[in-house]
Amino acid sequence: MPNVWILGTLALSIAFSALPGAVGAQPGALSARDSALIGRILLAEDRRDSTDGALAEGARHGDARVRVLAQRARGRIRDPRFAARESLPVARPPVPWPEPAWRLRYRALTARRAECAAVRSALADSAWPVRLHAADLVTAPCAPDDSLIRVLRGWIDALPAEASRRSSDGVSWHAAAHALVALARVEPREARPRVRTLAAHRQWQVRTYAARAAAVLSDTVLLRTLARDTDDNVKEVAIESLAKLTGHADDDLFLAALRGDGAQAVRAAAIALKASPRADVSTAANATFERWVARANQSERDVRVALLEAAGRPASDDRPPPDRIELPPQAVALALGADLRLRVTIARRSGGGSFVVRLRGDAAPMMAARILALVRSGYYDGLSWHRVEHDFVIQGGSPGANEYVGLAQYLRDELGSVPHARGTVGMSTRGHDTGDAQWFVNLKDNLRLNRDYTVFAEVIEGIDVVDGILEGDVMEHVRVELSTPR
């Protein structure tokens, strides 16, 4: 890990308060010229430019903080995985957070997934994450368990027409949606009419789970309907499922889906069309590819590549938009240890509450500064946590509520020595240097992520709110909680 860690330690101990315009007012303060040099070092690292003279100038600097930044930049440029970080001093460790008691039951249930009695008992657990997990573990051998089936039916039939709100300790659409897929696995006869009913529900997440249940039931008629849904996340699941069941028999439907604007649905349709025997697929895929190139969104690379493959072309034909390299406000201050915090407020209709994260500019100053700028622009307001794995991570901040829609400009990796411990906040990517501005919060220690994912913040308040987030919960807004002067 970079000497980011030395940097973090020094910056915090020196309590640096002279920001980019300040000049040597106190021992250890840096001049405006020094701050400008730090900015050049950060930009050189962001460009991955090992020839920039700022790196050599920084390496010779009299201040250890500047030397550390230059050394770290060189290491990250030279090695995408920055293996050398392991030999450097460790950064300030993240805040340690205890586990909620229910998570132990959650894990224990996974080990007993083959025991229908244990799964049935967990359906009545006091914590909804455990209950939902139990529903996801229901399999065909549990079909004779009438009590278990009764609970699943009850969850489904209790779903109201308006299911967009929940209390802090309750669910909204979640129980019925998870139960629907479970019932499809164990009691198809009872599931089928319920799946068709919920496929028309006003809540798009319910329709998404209906598509998953329809796939379990091999209900291609319903999947064709859902593949034309108004919501692209529903369309994605339906198209993927239909392609597995019917192959190229539904290429007309997949070709029609290429005309849409949802990255996830267009990608699914392009993948379904790959190796199609139809002569018109290549023409349609090429035309759609050109349309998506014109959107100039780096994070939509997966869509463009899928379209190229559908057209029989290599991924190397992709034409991503050019990088925009600029120094975000407060990147230098963050690199020098500025304490900047963000409060994430969950919408009342999603249970309410809030939690605070502290940006780890000592480890990832450019990423932290860009996230800060996005927060100040209101980028995250109203976005949701679309991925929730209660014994792994929560992930959110996508304008499309899925992993394929993100910020138009990629964020570079800034791998460091802050481990992916419980409560740390990492950047979602789909490969090296493809940060899409989606956050994920580690719900447990996920040290296997250290090699590939940047930690740019950590939860310092409200971990119970984080633990209680359910799929689809909405961020009412994200605001700067504590800021140092510019």
Image (cartoon, rainbow, N blue to C red):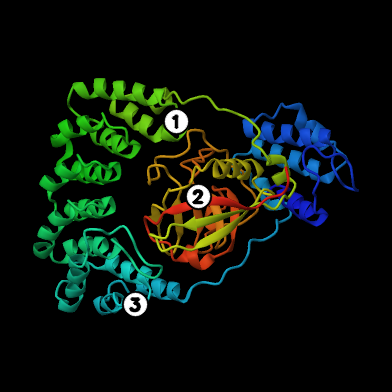
Point 17% across, 74% down: residue:
150
Point 38% across, 42% down: residue:
400
**Residue under numbered circle 1:** 297
**Near-viewer residue (370 or 76):** 370
**Residue under numbered circle 3:** 125
Q: For residue 391, what is the image quadrant?
A: bottom left
The disc, 2 or 1, on the residue closer to the chain's N-terminal end is: 1
Point 29% across, 34% down: residue:
266
**Near-viewer residue (452 or 393):** 393
Measured as percent of width and height from the top left, residue 60 is found at 85, 36
Quarter of the C terminus within the rendering: top right
**Residue under numbered circle 2:** 439
Give SS at disc 2.
strand
Measured as percent of width and height from the top left, residue 65 is found at 80, 45
Residue 217 in view in this figure? no
- Structural distance between the alpha carbons of marks 3 and 1: 44 Å
Q: Is residue 371 above or below residue 115?
A: above
The disc, 3 or 2, on the residue closer to the chain's N-terminal end is: 3
The disc, 3 or 1, on the residue closer to the chain's N-terminal end is: 3
Give SS at disc 3.
loop
Q: Is residue 87 above or below residue 264?
A: below
- In this image, 414 relative to 308: left or right? right
- Structural distance between the alpha carbons of marks 2 and 1: 18 Å
Binning the other alpha carbons within 10 Å of mark 3 as few (below 14), some (14 to 19) or many (20 upward) gives some
- Tag 3 and tag 2, C-beta contact below 8 Å: no
Name the amino acid, label 1: Asn
Q: Is residue 8 above or below residue 191?
A: above
- In this image, 380 relative to 461: left or right? left
Binning the other alpha carbons within 10 Å of mark 2 as few (below 14), some (14 to 19) or many (20 upward) gives many
